[in-house]
Image: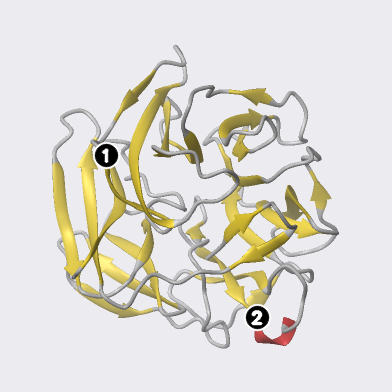
Amino acid sequence: MKILFFIFPIAVFAQAPQNVESTLETIDIKSGKRTIILKEKRHFEAPNWSRDGKYFIINAKGLLERVSTSGEKLGIINTGIANKCNNDHGISFDGKMIVISHNDSTMRGNKGGTSRIFTLPIDGGTPKLITEKAPSYWHGISPDGQTLVYCASRNGEFDVYSIPVNGGEEKRLTDAQSLDDGPEYSPDGKYIYFNSHRTGKMHIYRMKPDGSEQEQLTNDEYSNWFAHPSPDGKSIVFITYIEDQKAAHPFGKDVKLRLMDLKTKKIKDLTEVFFGGQGTINVPSWSPDSKQLAFVTYRIDN
């Protein structure tokens, strides 16, 4: 979990209050109908929709859990030593692997954060370290399963990086003097979508996988984060903060989900404004058929 404030080049970590109620919902893209899957008086985050469409993966208290599409709790995924997983996790296109970001205690004292990226089999097992350096926050995997993309701080600057799925030398893809975050591949592998604060407002961008041809896609008064391309490649969904949050994506703010048609570049509201933010839609959460989307809303129980 990361909330970044760029008055000083450090990462500030914040937790949701104890009296929070979390609701896992789905929304039908065409009709706008919302369905409650799971509502509990605890804090959970960031649903991934499984590639077979049968369940979700969420994170809570450093662990990953499975929840069926009918709301049945299917148990905790064995992530071995990686027991401090944050909300940057996801599933490979072939459905065989989970990629996680784990706040690694072996990196204690590391300036900027301790998150490192690991991979493990979809059913759980021994996590394999991919990024030697920290902090590194996973966000995307290439359709061919060969490359991971992520947000990382190196020398006090947060940028988008890529690395081979089995580890190796990382490659810096952005170098704007600002926060670049949330990289995710399009399903055809032609683009990486990301968000950047390079103009002084957080907006959605895309670029070629080698970092070239960086193109701004949103330009409005809002703070726009975490663009997730639909599996059919026709649109992206992203979370919009109603009030400008600078270079941060905090918990507990008024937000809405919006949808961009990638052919026309037109944007429409997918939801009305709700209480959410950090944890709502940090990770890929489309249904495999591109007809629905999963997300989390919150309520503070007073």
Rounded to the nearest whole Å, what is the CA distance between mark 2 and mark 1?
Answer: 35 Å
- For label 1, count other residues whose C-alpha is less than 10 Å away and answer few (under 14), some (14-19) or many (20+): some
* Quadrant in the picture for the C terminus: bottom left
Q: Position of residue 253 (x, y in %)?
A: 37, 51
Q: First in sequence, mark 2 or 1: give its number.
A: 2
Question: Which one is closest to the eye, mark 2 or mark 1?
Answer: 1
Label 1 sits on what residue type? Val
Residue 47 occupies quadrant: bottom left
- Asked if the residue under mark 1 is in contact with the one under mark 2, i.e. CB atoms within 8 Å, the reply is no
Q: Which mark is residue 273?
A: 1
Q: Nearer the viewer, residue 20 or 114?
A: 20
Q: Position of residue 5 (x, y in %)?
A: 63, 55
Label 2 sits on what residue type? Asp
Image: 160 above or below 19: above
Image: 272 above or below 93: above
Left or right position of 164 against 22: right
Left or right position of 281 against 97: left
Q: Residue at x 52, y 65 (%)?
A: 1
